Amino acid sequence: MTSSAQNQLIVIEEGSARLEGMLQLPEDPIIGMVLFAHGSGSSRLSPRNKHVAAMFRNAHIATLLADLLSSEEEQNYQMRFDISLLSRRLDMAAEWLLQDERTRALPLGLFGASTGAAAALQVAAEREADIAAVVARGGRVDLAGRTALTTLNVPTLLIVGGLDNVVIDLNRAALASMECEKRLEIVPDATHLFEEEGKLEIVASMATDWFTRHMEKLLGSPYQRSGDYPGKEDRTER
């Protein structure tokens, strides 16, 4: 990894699926990598996720914002809520990061919003040895399904707006099903998209703290990174 920031538009292909994403690597030291799972009707161009991603990079966390659906697929409302499809696409992106020489040595976190949060939880449940932590913003975590929720063994932070009553109830029910390290944070006076002044910054700060804490556990000490991090081999083979 070079010492300067890097931005690259990448393409991930598998079978008929083709994902485009923006990989952004901050200046060293880099403590981890966060893969974004966008919500229904959103994309890598989402101003909210771009804003959160920028705050992650300020904290020395690299980011990949990838489109899990093509522009044509986004027009199909049912595909936006096809969690199995979104999970497969997200898993493609995770595998790419775990193989690319620039990112494979970095602890990997998943940041999911709305339906993307359900996909993130499913991938984390399947790939627990590869995922350092998960954060869901206004997530439809209930759509992950009971199997994923009850078998999940990855530290998971759920963040919901205080005015988003239905999603609060869904997240509380999902939290009760989880047996992993978990936390629910409710941001006062925030709606589902956290559009109120300063609310998205609170989300980004909470998420940054969660990812940093769990990524640094894998690195061994703050901002220590050299080749594969301690425990990497054990985690991937488990």
Image: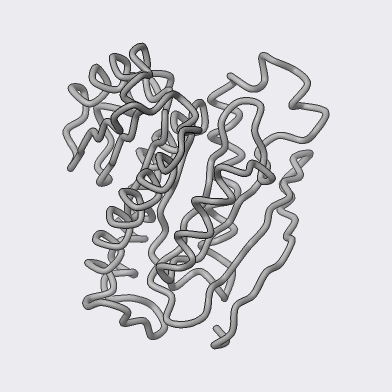
Q: Quadrant of residue 152?
A: top left
Residue at image coords 46%, 39%: 197
Q: Find residue 211 and report its horizontal and vertical position in percent.
A: 33, 56
Q: Quadrant of residue 221?
A: bottom left
Q: Determine whether 217 is above or below 201 in the image.
A: below
The one nearer the camera, 48 or 9, is 48
Q: Find residue 111 and report its horizontal and vertical position in percent.
A: 45, 45
Q: Quadrant of the C terminus?
A: bottom left
Q: How many marks?
A: 0
The one nearer the camera, 100 or 41, is 41
Q: Determine whether 11 is above or below 202 in the image.
A: below
The one nearer the camera, 73 or 49, is 49
State the colouring used for the structure image. Answer: one colour
> As drawn, is 218 to the left or to the right of 21?
left
Q: Find residue 226 and report its horizontal and vertical position in percent.
A: 38, 85
Residue at image coords 18%, 22%: 176
> As drawn, is 161 to the left or to the right of 67?
left
Q: Find residue 174 and report its horizontal and vertical position in percent.
A: 27, 22
Q: Determine whether 227 is above or below 167 in the image.
A: below
Q: Residue furthest right?
A: 72
Residue at image coords 21%, 29%: 178
Q: Quadrant of the N terminus?
A: bottom right
Q: Determine whether 167 is above or below 86 in the image.
A: above
> As drawn, is 53 to the left or to the right of 41?
left
Residue at image coords 69%, 53%: 21
